[in-house]
Amino acid sequence: MKVKILGGHGGVTIGAHATSFLIDDQLLIDAGSVASTISIEKQSRIDNILISHPHLDHIKDLAFLCDNCFGMREKPFQVWTHTTVMGMIKTHLFNDSIWPDFSVLPTKKNPTIQFNALAPEVTVEIGGYLVTPVLVQHPSDAMGYIVEKEGKAILFTLDTAATTRIWQKAHQYPALKAIFTEVSFPNKLQKVATASDHHTPQTLAEELKKMPPGVPVILTHIKPNFRAELEQEIAELGESRIQIMSRDGMEFNF
Ligand SMILES: [Zn+2]
Ligand SMILES: [Zn+2]
């Protein structure tokens, strides 16, 4: 599996895009920056989109993806997420006020986007991948995903604070090749991180103990204004299996 980090930041500014991971150019995880980082032609070739939770930095480019690819595809983009998240995206984004309702455009019978419900811990086959969603510690029934193909597995927590269940599940995957997780704020902003269900380097250090040993951990969702501080605090953890996502556009092959 090839994982391309289209956007790996917990914010948006010059040189920092919001969360979007593209697997093998066809399966998208979160839509924070898909419309602004790859060509429209490549956007139109994505069939399935997993959404972790409805925060704007994870869904905003669904709007522009639909707009860009309107009428270009023979079948709708299939969005997969928790029913809570689905309801929020429909109510607050594709509501004909903030943005047109592309789930009935150009026609109800042949829309640009379709929503599919995922239940926590029920594995489904999506576009040739086995996908297992697991609830994490973040608002609105946020879920992380374990994605499997050809005997290999990759785990994405997306946004979360300290959590347990996804790490229990992770131990059931001996072929787990990588863990993509988050660290958002420096230690001095622990209160903000706790209130918003995100990690700092010091809470991440505790979280690492729950993860299967030896599996590489790639850190994303860094707030752009705290990058230097975060890099220093993460280096001080002295954990050799950690890698910080250093720039958007990075590719990993597993
Ligand atoms: Zn986020
Ligand atoms: Zn969030």
Image (cartoon, grey):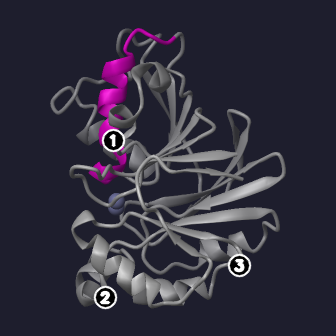
Q: Is residue 237 magenta?
A: no
| Image location (x, y in percent) of residue 119 | 59, 52
Residue 39, compared with residue 10, is above or below; it is above
Foreground pick, 128 / 233: 233
Q: Is residue 124 above or below residue 205?
A: above
Which residue is denoted by mark 1 in the rendering? Answer: 89
Mark 3: which amino acid? Pro
Q: Does residue 6 appear to the left or right of 101 in the view shown?
A: right
**Does residue 102 appear anywhere in the picture?**
no
Residue 116 is left or right of residue 37, and the answer is right
Secondary structure state at the residue bearing disc 3: loop
Mark 1 to mark 3 CA distance (whole Å): 33 Å
The kind of secondary structure the magenta stretch mainly shows is helix
- Sooner in the amino-acid sequence: mark 2 or mark 1: 1
Distance, label 2 to label 1, CA atoms, is 32 Å
* Quarter of image, res 92: top left
Residue 83 screen position, x and y as percent = 46, 47
Under tag 1, what secondary structure?
A: helix
Q: Secondary structure at mark 2?
A: helix
In the image, residue 189 above or below residue 102: below
Give the label on residue 187, or none: 2
Numbered circle sitting on residue 155: none
| Region of the chain picked out in magenta, as a range | 55-73
**What's under tag 1, amino acid-wise?**
Ile
